[in-house]
Image (cartoon, rainbow, N blue to C red):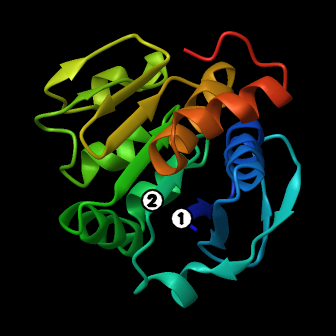
Amino acid sequence: MPTVLVPLFTGFEEIEAITIIDVLRRADIEVITASLDELTVMGAHAIAIIADKSLDQVESHIFDAIALPGGAGTFRLREDPRVAKMLTAHTHAQKLVAAICAAPTVLSAAGLLKDKRATSFPAVKSQLQVGEYLESPVVVDGNVVTSRGAGTAMAFALKLVEILNGAAIADQIATSMIVQPRN
């Protein structure tokens, strides 16, 4: 069973985080949520989520993927040296690194988008150092997956399912959730 880490931080975008967690778990992917600080984490719209673990508890573990939600507090991910270290380690291990909304800025700050095609929330485009910026809902380039924002969260999560568990499972999940068309 694939494993995915979803770091949570004060000010995360709830739709993005919950969609990733929910859709991946529906696909029998083990999702571990990890808080940068306290286990109870307040999202951007005052929705509190209790993380499974603290980031300290999982920072030495290699997951099949790390999926970063965006939101107003994304700067907390960029400023946390543990996150950059984990993203770099996962990239070197040829594992998936994924980010939505403002979170591609975290990948960029870690130097992981320099030669990649990527996308992001339009307002943070100027903060990215990318090979090529695209305005597609979801962009996959090698082991990097990026997406635009809350409105693309379902497509982003289903793309992660496709990569980790195959297109048939992603299609099955999409159909069961009445998401049409998936591609």
Disc 2 to disc 1, C-alpha distance: 8 Å
Kindly indicate the quadrant of the structure image that contains residue 176.
top right
Is label 2 in a helix, a strand or a loop?
Answer: strand
Q: How crowded is mark 2: few (under 14 residues within 10 Å), some or many (20 or more)?
A: many
**Closest to the observer: 165 or 155?**
165
Identify the residue at horizontal 13%, vertical 38% (top origin): 114
Q: Quadrant of residue 161?
A: top right
User: Which residue lies at the image location 78% right of the left edge and 48% below the top edge?
Assistant: 22
Find disc 2 in the rendering and name its residue: 65
Q: On screen, 105 above or below 111?
A: above
Quarter of the image containing the N terminus? bottom right
What amino acid type should be assigned to the residue bearing mark 2?
Ala
Q: Which amino acid does label 1 sit on?
A: Pro
The location of residue 105, given as percent across then percent down, is 36, 40
Asked whether the residues under the numbered discs 2 and 1 touch, taking CB atoms below 8 Å apart as contact, a structural biologist would say yes
Corner quadrant of residue 181: top right
Q: Earlier in the sequence, mark 2 or mark 1?
A: 1
Percent x, y of residue 159: 52, 33
> Residue 54 at x, y = what percent?
64, 82
